[in-house]
Image: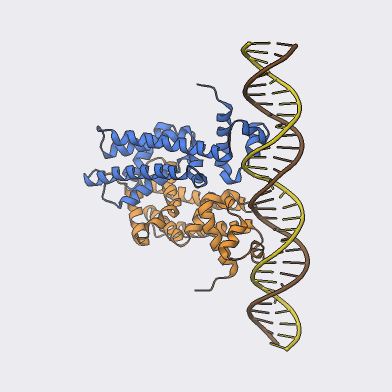
Chain colours: A orange, B blue, C brown, D yellow
DNA sequence: TTTACTATATAACGTGAGTTTGATATTAGT
DNA sequence: ACTAATATCAAACTCACGTTATATAGTAAA
């Protein structure tokens, strides 16, 4: 476990505040106080409030992209297995970074310089997801329900994970992954 | 169709801005400009920025509560039918008020005086939902998957509807309702 | 035409935002 | 111990925020 730089500490504390109140409602003085320092001191470690936001969101966005690329490239998995891998990817990243996930979901629109890059990452991710579902329907592994609605439904659940994880500490990551796969893939009706 | 008061117009325009940038990032001057008036003039129709937020969120919150109360009270429906009614309720309210839904989902924490009231509405709504699912599992209408995970999964999808509706104007409300019921209840795997 | 009322505008107030500056303290390497 | 780099802070800057006070224009009843 590598020790944390001061900048990493600032980002870590900032993202918890962003999760609670949203980027725009958190002030540099709020962050400074939580770090235990005066606002001016933050600027020895970061360039701007914007930079904190970009750090958080872009890092996670690229992690999802890398994960999805691996899943797509894997030639030994069928569509269902790829969906299970996607669920696993979301659970894994969210368990490790719940505050970053909250910030990405809620405050991406406050990115400035990196907004276009983020949107591209996101579009590509959704498109890969869509292609996996499409293939699954074509080869008969998935039911022929409206493609966009499946995509929407699964992604909504996975993107909201950060909201529920803290409340369910009792649920182990592995259990969560399995139960989620059941619910999302097989449904709940007898 | 009753004509719109100036206050209603202000709230309607404000909620579209809130959806785009979030409550904290929207200024009274932004709202004023979109209405076509100076910021100070808004105060002839509203008491404060806070009041706009409360108006939006509490109204929708109470609409959900009323709808859920009806569904719970209906003695002629089983658990599955009640779930279908809940889906219908969400689709109906979201189609009519996408911006209000966005604001409620993202900015409820900026309520001040009415925060406790909102949280009570929400807690009660979730508890009613939970009881319906619990009953469904007990009587064997629903599979015996982790209760909280089902609740989380369905609610996440329904609460995110506002994000997807605008993109899918092609999808009629009735189709959306039916397809969603299929996906959420019966799953997507063959 | 006067009166009362409503809607808007102008100007400004007090506050707190993100950030910069410049001085002082602390730490690390030689 | 000395130096160079790093970290902190107090203070202040500029700007924009929500809001108030007050003046002006438009409208409709008396």
Q: Compare residues A56 and B114 and report the one nearer the observer.
A: B114
Q: Nearer the viewer, residue C17 or A148?
A: C17
> Residue B68: horizontal and vertical position, in percent?
35, 37
Q: How many marks?
A: 0
Judged left or right of residue B8, residue A161 is left
Report the quarter where the C terminus of chain A lies: top left
Residue D28 against residue B59 in the figure, above or below: above
Q: Position of residue B71 (x, y in %)?
A: 32, 35
* Direction from residue A115 to residue A142 in the image, left or right: left
Q: Residue at x 48, y 57 (%)?
A: A68
Residue lying at 41% horizontally and 46% vertically, measured from the top left: B156
B57 left or right of D8 in image: left
Q: Quadrant of residue C28?
A: bottom right
- Is residue A88 visible in the rendered structure shown here? yes
Q: Nearer the viewer, residue A5 or D2?
A: D2
Counting from the top left corner in percent of width and height, residue A120 is at 57, 51
């Amino acid at each position: 476990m590598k020790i944390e730089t001061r900048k990493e500490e600032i980002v870590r504390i900032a993202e918890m505040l962003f999760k609670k109140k949203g980027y725009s409602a958190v002030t540099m003085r709020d962050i400074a106080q939580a770090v235990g320092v005066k606002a001016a001191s933050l600027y020895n470690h970061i360039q701007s409030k914007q930079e904190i936001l970009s750090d958080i969101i872009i890092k996670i966005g690229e992690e999802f992209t890398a994960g999805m690329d691996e899943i797509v490239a894997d030639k030994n998995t069928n569509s269902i297995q790829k969906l299970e891998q996607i669920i696993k990817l979301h659970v894994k990243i969210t368990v490790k970074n719940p505050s970053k996930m909250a910030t990405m979901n809620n405050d991406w629109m406050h990115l400035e310089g990196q907004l276009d890059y983020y949107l591209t990452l996101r579009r590509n991710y959704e498109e890969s997801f869509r292609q996996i579902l499409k293939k699954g329907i074509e080869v008969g592994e998935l039911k022929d329900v409206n493609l966009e609605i499946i995509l929407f439904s699964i992604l909504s659940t996975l993107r909201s994970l950060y909201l529920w994880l803290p409340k369910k500490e009792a649920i182990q990551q592995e259990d969560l992954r399995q139960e989620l796969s059941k619910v999302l893939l097989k449904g709940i009706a007898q």
